[in-house]
Image (tube, rainbow, N blue to C red):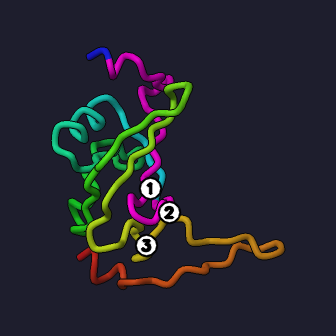
Amino acid sequence: MPWLDALHWDRDGLIPAIAQDRESGRVLMFAYMNRESLEETVRTGNAVYWSRSRGRLWRKGEESGHYQRVRELRTDCDGDVLLLSIDQEGGIACHTGRESCFFNVLDGERWQAVDPVLKDPKEIYR
């Protein structure tokens, strides 16, 4: 597919993908995609990533129920990063039960969690 060939994949066949809330503009998470996950994302309208730790496709929400509905897909000027404008089901993107994976702020010389846990991960992942 020409649109897939136009992207610049890394040596492992991956491309960085940033998920951004369509309404607020807040960056919710960062992950990687491979060709297969990106094709499935476009085909289904739901975000699918490549999990490096699991070594398999990761259909966001498959365990938690917190699916990401992709509303728009963009690439940067170099074609080596994807930006997904998404609607986050349940308002939780992070496995810690927070809205965003980016909840730590550097406070002096230490990282401080500043966003609340919206749901206990033990209730999300059974």
Q: Horizontally, is 37 left or right of 8 in the view? A: left
Residue visible at 41% across and 18% down in the picture: 6
The disc, 3 or 2, on the residue closer to the chain's N-terminal end is 2
The disc, 3 or 1, on the residue closer to the chain's N-terminal end is 1
Q: Are marks 3 and 1 in contact (CB under 8 Å)?
A: no
Which residue is under mark 3? 99
How packed mark 1 is, by other alpha carbons closer than 10 Å (few <14, some 14-19, many 20 or more), is many
How packed mark 2 is, by other alpha carbons closer than 10 Å (few <14, some 14-19, many 20 or more), is some
The image shows residue 24, relative to residue 40, as above or below, that is below
Farthest front residue in view: 23
Q: Secondary structure at mark 1?
A: strand
Q: Are marks 2 and 1 in contact (CB under 8 Å)?
A: yes
The image shows residue 103, relative to residue 85, as above or below, that is below
Residue visible at 42% across and 67% down in the picture: 94
Label 2 and label 1: CA atoms lie apart by: 6 Å
Residue visible at 44% across and 48% down in the picture: 31
Q: Residue 55, position in %: x, y?
A: 34, 42
At label 2, the amino acid type is: Arg
How packed mark 3 is, by other alpha carbons closer than 10 Å (few <14, some 14-19, many 20 or more), is many
Name the one closer to the observer, 53 or 10: 10
- Quarter of the figure that contains the N terminus: top left
Q: Residue 61, position in %: x, y?
A: 25, 61
Name the one closer to the observer, 42 or 22: 22
At label 1, the amino acid type is: Gln
Q: Are marks 3 and 2 in contact (CB under 8 Å)?
A: yes
Which residue is under mark 1? 20
Read off the magenta span: 3-28
The disc, 2 or 1, on the residue closer to the chain's N-terminal end is 1
Q: Residue 45, position in %: x, y?
A: 21, 46
Which residue is under mark 2? 26
